[in-house]
Image: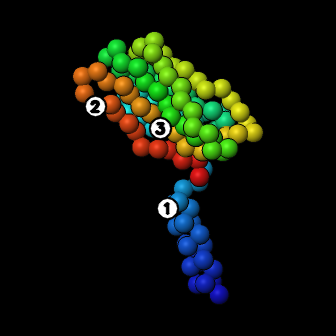
Amino acid sequence: MRKRAAIVAAVVLGGTVLIGAPSASAKVCASNSCSTAIDSWNGVQICDGDADGNAVESNFYRDNGSHQTIKESRGNGNCTGSGSDSGNKVYRHQAHQFRDWAPDLWSSFEYRY
């Protein structure tokens, strides 16, 4: 019986490690410009981390299916937030860095679940 319980526990714990538990804050970056889910996924924030003169944006999707973007154009060290909506949480987001001298950079998507 102990062996069966140990196997079940290992499968459950292994699944948690492989799938991952939802996080309260998740960050994805394109170069040094990062999009972060904030306030328990109620909104997103994009921060420009490169002193290159290029704008950055966060592409994000909410539970109701809407696609939204926020753009930061003020330069290195500045951030812009989407605002918080606890009734319509963000379920995925990504960072996008506009570049004049090369193809734009895109991060992978980060998912809430």
Q: Position of residue 106 (x, y in %)?
A: 38, 36
Residue located farthest toward the right when viewing the structure as drawn: 87
Above/below status of 45 relative to 25: above
Residue type at tag 2? Pro
Q: Mark 2 or mark 1: which comes first in sequence? A: 1
Residue at mark 2: 103
Residue type at tag 3? Gln
Q: Is residue 62 visible?
A: yes
Q: Mark 1 or mark 3: which comes first in sequence? A: 1
Q: Secondary structure at mark 3?
A: strand
Residue located farthest toward the front when viewing the structure as drawn: 66
Q: Position of residue 40 (x, y in %)?
A: 66, 38
Q: Position of residue 8 (x, y in %)?
A: 60, 77
> Which residue is drawn at the image coordinates 31% and 24% (left, top)?
99
Q: Secondary structure at mark 2?
A: loop
Residue at mark 1: 18
13 vs 66, nearest the viewer? 66
Asked if the residue under mark 1 is in contact with the one under mark 2, i.e. CB atoms within 8 Å, the reply is: no
Neighbor class of circle 2 (other Cα within 10 Å; few <14, some 14-19, many 20+) is few
Residue located farthest toward the top when viewing the structure as drawn: 74
Q: Determine the CA span between mark 1 and mark 3.
A: 21 Å
> Which residue is drawn at the image coordinates 45% and 15% (left, top)?
73
Residue at mark 3: 94
23 vs 2, nearest the viewer? 23
Q: Determine the CA span between mark 2 and mark 3.
A: 16 Å
Tell me the quarter of the image containing the N terminus.
bottom right
Q: Secondary structure at mark 1?
A: helix
Residue type at tag 1? Leu
Q: Determine the CA span between mark 2 and mark 1.
A: 33 Å
Closer to viewer: mark 2 or mark 3:
2
> Which residue is drawn at the image coordinates 49% and 31% (left, top)?
58
